[in-house]
Amino acid sequence: MSNITLAQARKAIDAAIQKSNDLGVKMNIAVVDAGTNLVAFNKMDDAWLGSIDIAQKKARTARYFNMDTGAIGQLSQPGGSLYNIEHSNGGLITFPGGVVIKDGEGNIIGAIGVSGSTVEDDHEVASAGATAV
């Protein structure tokens, strides 16, 4: 299993911070490795304290299921095949802002989770971080 390196995680966080600044929002940004261990974290000045845990859970959720958290959210709606999944694994986050990170060969090496604004902004910032790797 390949893992994201600290250098790659910092690159993802730097890109996410840049996108956050472009959008004019304050974010908490977490990067986990392929085993869901926290590799890097950044709380931007004045970012919401409540979003620290959410960012980390978004990253872990994306990696647990190898898909963006927004996709999991669509599947977990009432009547969906993953309804109530957010209650598993000690609590998951099933709305946008968690994105898997892949290496150049398409292997998943970790995930990034972002929280602190709208879910649309969170996903955009997370995607910018993931793409930077």
Image (cartoon, rainbow, N blue to C red):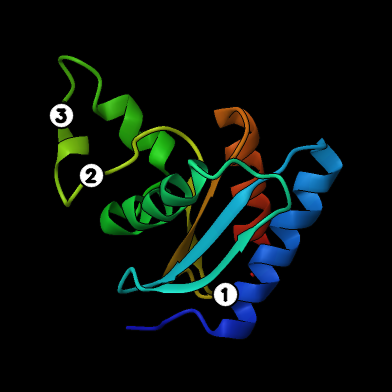
Q: Quadrant of residue 123?
A: top right
Q: Looking at the picture, how far across and down is residue 52, in whole percent? A: 49, 50
Which quadrant is the N terminus positioned in?
bottom left
Q: Position of residue 59 (x, y in %)?
A: 42, 55
Pointer 3 residue: 84
Q: Is residue 80 above or below residue 102?
A: above
What residue is at 71 percent from the left and 45 percent from the top? 46
- Per the image, the residue denoted by label 1 is 104
- Amino acid, disc 3: Asn
Crowd tier of the residue under label 3, counting other residues whose Cα lies within 10 Å: few below 14, some 14–19, many 20 or above:
some
Q: Nearer the viewer, residue 49 or 62?
A: 49
Q: Select label 1 or label 2 by which is in front.
A: 2
Q: Is there CB contact under 8 Å for labels 1 and 3?
A: no
The residue at which mark 2 appears reads as 91
Name the kind of residue labelled 2 in the image: Gly
User: Contact (CB < 8 A) between labels 2 and 3?
Assistant: no
The answer to which of marks 1 and 2 sits earlier in the sequence is 2
- Placement of 102 over or under 79, stated as above or below: below
Rendered view: 69 above or below 120: below
The amino acid at mark 1 is Gly
Q: Earlier in the sequence, mark 1 or mark 3?
A: 3
Residue 27, numbered circle: none
Q: Contact (CB < 8 A) between labels 1 and 2?
A: no
Distance from Cα at disc 2 to Cα at disc 3:
10 Å
Q: In the image, residue 118 lies at what x, y percent?
A: 60, 27
Given residues 104 and 19, the one toward you in this image is 19
Number of numbered labels in the structure image: 3
- Indicate which label's residue lies in the foreground, 1 or 3: 3
